[in-house]
Image (cartoon, helix red, strand yellow):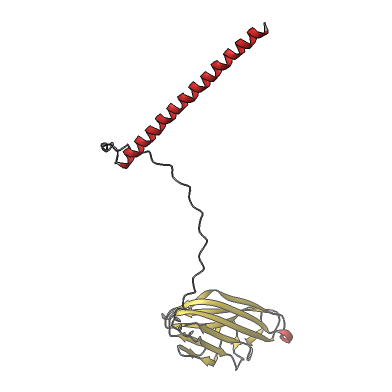
Amino acid sequence: MVIRLNKIQGSFSDDAKEQSRQTAEFEREVQNTFDQVEVAVAEAAASGGGEKGDKGDKGDAGTAGADGTNGTNGTNGSPGTNGTDGTDGADGADAATPLWYQGADTVGGTTVAGTYVTLPLVDQISDTGFSNSSGEVTIATADRYEFHVDVTIDETSGGRTTSNCKLQRDGGTGTWVDVPGAQRRMYHRQPSDGETSASINMVLQVVAGEVFRLQGVRVSGSGVLSFLINGSSFMIRRNP
């Protein structure tokens, strides 16, 4: 039994050796074939290969790519230098000098009775364009004028009495008219304290050649009244 088993194992061993030899022989043949192909490829490359084929057709254009993102803003530039100063403008015209008239009652004593009487004036200032005649002041140039009038009437005897003063104007026609809002009423109690004063301050538009005056009158009572010496003034101002 043992002898038979050994014979079988020997037979298997011989078969395996033959199989191994055949495999090795096949591998050598395959390698030789690969070597021959490599040589043929190399020779073809060295000799320029086969004829060059025709140029292929141009392919269709690809679709446009998406827009790229915006870049970041650059930094601000430095401020520019200041420009040169402009030339000075021409000097303005000098302001005009105001023109004045001022008169005062430096004599006093003119009686103020039941009929209107004009306040007498002695010129104190009389610029060009003004003239005074017996308390009537003529203005030569048409313009807007300021009037400032102060009047004082004194009671020298009698009792309780009232008086009135007013500013009048004559536009050159010879007709005197009262200036609206330019009347003042005064009350005289008794001779010992009979002086009473009033003021008129106005701005009037004057025509050329117009004349102005201040008048006083006793309104009620029996007191003896008169303009107080140095108690009244008549001032006109023009701003050219």
Image coordinates for residue 28, horizontal then vertical, percent = 45, 28
**Residue 96 in the figure: left or right of residue 33:** right
Image coordinates for residue 176, horizontal then vertical, percent = 47, 79
Residue positioned most to the front: 3
In the displayed structure, 184 sits above or below 107; it is: above
* In the foreground, 196 or 122: 122
Q: Quadrant of residue 58?
A: top left
Please give the name of the residue rendered at 46% of the width and 46% of the height, measured from the top-left corner: 68
Residue positioned most to the bottom: 107
Quadrant, the N terminus: top right
In the displayed structure, 223 sits above or below 16; it is: below
**Residue 205 in the figure: left or right of residue 113:** left
The number of numbered badges drawn on the structure is 0
**Residue 120 in the figure: left or right of residue 91:** right
* In the foreground, 41 or 20: 20
Residue 149 seen by the camera: yes
Please give the name of the residue rendered at 70% of the width and 84% of the height, measured from the top-left corner: 194
Q: Quadrant of residue 44?
A: top left
Residue positioned most to the right: 192
Please give the name of the residue rendered at 52% of the width and 84% of the height, measured from the top-left corner: 237
In the displayed structure, 151 sits above or below 55; it is: below
**Residue 48 in the figure: left or right of residue 215:** left
